[in-house]
Image (spheres, coloured by chain):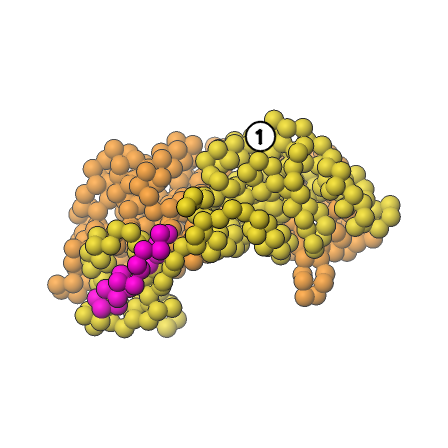
Chain colours: A yellow, B orange
């Protein structure tokens, strides 16, 4: 079975300034995992034409799918569509279908010049429809261009993902334990060495208020090879070390 | 005045799988803005040696400061320190000071082999102390290596940032309005054209429950040039368009 990869380009000065916490890439990441598409990298870049062009060219050549978020609104700082046109040497012009959708959406006389900008995109783009605020995203080559507002992005992404070619979803089992990571590290290491087809991640956490801590051990595998023996080994190891474990 | 730039490398499969929402880069971003250091890019990469090495070399040559988070714990999937040693062609070995700190921290007989891994780092590193769980981060060249657990990362970052050379902080004023973005876009465009020294960002939002929306207009400038005339122009423009505005 063919495997599919993805990269996400988050576009926006507001993320780099810390004003906005990006939640789009986490939403896309979770969905991709369930759909069997491997997310390889996420990058957050500024609203700068050259930066967008370079990153789009780079990601487009590396991954099966590229998702961009942000920078497709009507204002002067929305330069994503223009930059992507340039990245692919395509004319940046009014998409007739997008124009009609927006023209119909706005009250008569209010489809002004800045709003018309939202109908401009690389020639040959396929629209990604926006059931919430009309302004569409688009797909050009293997790049899917989405808005930055999470509520709108998510609705559009749910529709979009249905149409993509996918691999088998990754099987993931998480084991929680009250033992500290450094106590079990060496044993996890041995278990990982024994089962090469599974990947074992170890994620410690601390609760400052309750003054407790522990580890989430995430066992995952793309090839659906038997994941159960690994889980059994880990649960048994935790017990031998005097800890508690639960599948979460 | 010299200006300083930064890049953040978030290391961890758990972010790319969507299991964990990265909040470290947002925390660092906000702090850097206040400290006058320009955050240029954030990248999220997997726990893979070659990927870490390539990214560290690339960021280290581009930015004044590089911050990495994640992958410095005691388990097999913690390969950040080893990879960074390799990126700079430095020996990956026990740091005596780090070893002593950890040896003192753990009860007698519990400073085991995996825990000792946390004392290994590129030779010549300077420690970044961890007042919470002892295991230190480190600085090598212009790269600052921090843990992934947010509570620990933040405490260490607060101390670390005090020692960095900084520029003037960016001045930021945010104006909220109830008008829709597409209504004011063309006027914001004109105002931006008039004031080249300020950057004007426009961030629409929607409240699905209250069925309301609006825009946050962020006016910012690094060079402290007069920001007030821009704000006055925007507030006035909103009024002329029948909207409400407030400084937030």
**Depth order, front residue of B148/A137:** A137
- Subunit ID for the residue under disc 1: A
A231 relative position to B60: left or right:
left
Q: Report the residue at 71% width, 52% height from top.
A: A133
**Residue, disc 1:** A87
User: Residue B33: image x %, image y %?
Assistant: 51, 45
Q: Is residue A158 above or below residue A91?
A: below
Q: Is residue B24 left or right of residue B98?
A: right
Q: Specify the segment rendered in magenta.
A: A219-237
Residue at the top extreme, as displayed: A89
Q: Is residue B155 visible?
A: no
The residue sitting at the front extreme is A1
Does the magenta segment cover residue A229?
yes
The spot of residue B140 in percent (x, y) is 30, 39
In the rendered image, which quarter is residue A78 located in? top right
Q: Residue at x 21, y 41 (%)?
A: B92
Residue at horizontal 26 percent and vertical 51 percent from the top: A196
- Front-most of residues B192 and A226: A226
* A221, B102: nearer the viewer: A221
Q: Nearer the viewer, residue B98 or A103?
A: A103
Q: Is residue B30 above or below residue A240?
A: above
Residue B23 percent coordinates (x, y): 46, 55
Magenta residue check for A215: no
Residue B93 is at least partly visible in this image: yes
């Amino acid at each position: 079975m063919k495997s599919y990869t993805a990269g996400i380009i988050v576009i926006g000065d507001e993320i780099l300034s810390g004003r906005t916490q990006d939640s789009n890439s986490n939403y896309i990441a979770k969905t991709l995992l369930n759909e069997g598409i491997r997310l390889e990298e996420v990058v957050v870049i500024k609203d700068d034409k050259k930066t967008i062009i370079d990153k789009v060219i780079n990601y487009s050549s590396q991954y099966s799918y590229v998702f961009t978020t942000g920078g497709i609104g009507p204002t002067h700082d929305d330069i994503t569509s223009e930059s992507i046109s340039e990245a692919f040497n395509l004319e940046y012009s009014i998409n007739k279908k997008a124009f009609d959708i927006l023209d119909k959406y706005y009250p008569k006389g209010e489809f002004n010049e800045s709003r018309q900008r939202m109908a401009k995109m690389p020639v040959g783009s396929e629209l990604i429809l926006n059931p919430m605020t009309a302004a569409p995203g688009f797909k050009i080559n293997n790049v899917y261009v989405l808005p930055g507002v999470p509520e709108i992005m998510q609705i559009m992404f749910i529709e979009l993902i249905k149409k993509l070619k996918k691999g088998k979803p990754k099987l993931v089992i998480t084991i929680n334990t009250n033992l500290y990571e450094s106590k079990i590290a060496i044993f996890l290491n041995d278990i990982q060495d024994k089962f090469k087809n599974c990947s074992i991640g170890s994620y410690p956490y601390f609760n400052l208020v309750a003054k407790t801590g522990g580890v989430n051990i995430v066992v995952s595998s793309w090839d659906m090879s038997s994941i159960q023996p690994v889980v059994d080994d880990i649960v048994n190891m935790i017990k031998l070390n005097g800890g508690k474990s639960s599948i979460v």
